[in-house]
Amino acid sequence: MNFSLNSAKAQKVWSDADNLWILLVDGRQLSISMVCFHRLKEASAEQILDYSLSGGGLGIHWDNLDEDLYVPNLLMEITSTPHHGHIA
């Protein structure tokens, strides 16, 4: 399968006890262990569902958790990004 930024866009986000799930606009589902996301791991299911998409789905933002994810990075298995001078 060819990777492109056009297909690396989220359309829906949810979680279970162990994983963050992201449905991409091309129909793929991405599952990433919650261990990779400290803030999300500690959040309630309701807080996880309180997200917004930016850039047409390139970014996922949780205002109430001060967390941002960049979908293309997740597809490249990059789960940590600099945040206010430290690794999140």
Image: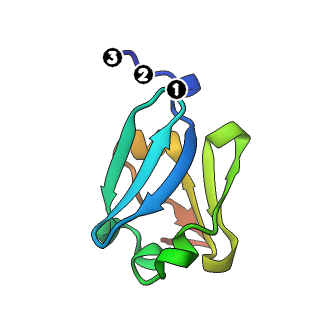
The answer to which of marks 3 and 1 sits earlier in the sequence is 3
Res. 7 mark? 1
Q: Which secondary structure lies at badge 2? A: loop
Please tell me how crowded label 3 is: few (under 14), some (14-19), or many (20+) other residues with Cα within 10 Å: few
Residue positioned 63% across, 69% down in the render: 50
Residue 67 point in image, percent of width and height = 58, 69
Residue 71 point in image, percent of width and height = 51, 44
Please tell me how crowded label 1 is: few (under 14), some (14-19), or many (20+) other residues with Cα within 10 Å: some
Camera-side residue of 80 and 40: 40
Q: Amino acid at mark 2?
A: Phe
Q: Is residue 83 left or right of residue 20?
A: right
Q: Is residue 2 above or below residue 72?
A: above
CB atoms of marks 3 and 2 within 8 Å: yes
Q: Where, by quadrant of the figure, is residue 41 drawn? A: bottom left
Residue 79 point in image, percent of width and height = 40, 56
Which image quarter holds the N terminus? top left
CB atoms of marks 1 and 2 within 8 Å: yes
Residue positioned 63% across, 75% down in the render: 66
Residue positioned 51% across, 33% down in the render: 8
Judging by the rendered image, the residue that carries numbered circle 2 is: 3
Q: What is the distance, in whole Å, between disc 3 and disc 2 at their CAs? A: 6 Å
Judging by the rendered image, the residue that carries numbered circle 3 is: 1
Q: What is the distance, in whole Å, between disc 1 and disc 2 at their CAs? A: 7 Å
